[in-house]
Amino acid sequence: MPTGGPSSKAVTYNTYLKVDELLELQQPLSEGPEHDETLFIVIHQVYELWFKQVLHETARVQRAFERGEVPLALSTLKRILTILKTLVGQVDVLETMTPMSFNSFRSRLDSASGFQSAQFRELEFRLGRKDPRTLEHHPQGSRGRRALDELYEQPSLWDSFLRFLALKEYPVPTEVLERDFRQPLEPSPEVQRILLRVYEDDHILGMLCERLVDLDEGLQEWRYRHVKMVERTIGHKPGTGGSDGVAYLRRSLFQPLFPDLWMIRTEL
């Protein structure tokens, strides 16, 4: 058999990253096309890629909690927080697009809207914010709907953290550990007392709590920057997907993912 020479199946930069396929995915709909439509598409496709990575990382944090692996949970949360800063930074790029530039192709979006992002809803579900009304925006049998239906029944990141505390022999109430995971997270005085003990007893576990606060704050920061970017771009026009635009987005602001960690601030 002949030897030597490059293999026809050698992995290259292009084949490994599917660069040619990736660069075919930006397909503006406007005539011309309008210059800024390419930027709009690229930014939102990159958001979806980062959402995919954050989902990948949050699943890892949950597994680390379930196994009691504190260093892995801390390092993975640090990575998630770094990604969130990147997501916020992308808003700066979007804000280089003027309202007139966006309006030049906005009508082409038809009913397309950011609240139809299945991956962002998956992230919300994984972090404990489960609103069954969001399911109706994702057709039965679609990839996103299957993922959301599965996450709707599963414990959230916070539920896994409470299981972790129970694993560390903190007296987390059984009714909290065995709650209906489909229901919204509610503040618990019993859990808050346990969290105060955690901060007093164990510096490392207290640091883990603070990384969860950072995660909560980081996501709220991204929401705020996103709302202000939309307001700057379209004012108070209705959203393309039929929502009431900025007013719809504002309702998501300042709603903590982990209320117990915020409610103990005055006691620390």
Image: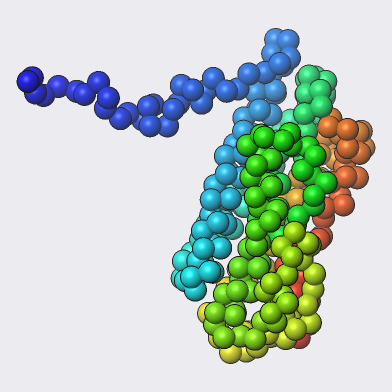
Tell me which corner region of the image, top left, top right, bottom left or bottom right, holds residue 155: bottom right
- Residue at x 32%, y 28% (from the top left corner): 12
- Residue at x 63%, y 18% (from the top left corner): 27
> Is 31 located above or below residue 27 in the figure?
above
Tell me which corner region of the image, top left, top right, bottom left or bottom right, holds residue 49: top right
- Furthest toward the top, the residue is 32
- Residue at x 74%, y 65% (from the top left corner): 180
> Is 238 located above or below residue 104 in the figure?
below
> Is 179 located above or below residue 25 in the figure?
below
> Is 20 located above or below residue 166 in the figure?
above
Q: Position of residue 218 (x, y in %)?
A: 67, 58
Residue 165 visible? The answer is: yes
Q: Position of residue 260 (x, y in %)?
A: 75, 74
Q: Is residue 234 left or right of residue 34?
A: right
Q: Is residue 12 left or right of residue 27?
A: left
Residue 93 visible? The answer is: no
Q: Is residue 240 left or right of residue 168?
A: right
Number of residue marks: 0
- Residue at x 61%, y 68% (from the top left corner): 160
Q: Is residue 173 left or right of residue 168?
A: right
Tell me which corner region of the image, top left, top right, bottom left or bottom right, holds residue 36: top right
Colouring: rainbow
Q: Position of residue 230 (x, y in %)?
A: 81, 39
Q: Position of residue 9 (x, y in %)?
A: 27, 25
Q: In which quadrant of the rendered image does the C terminus lie?
A: bottom right
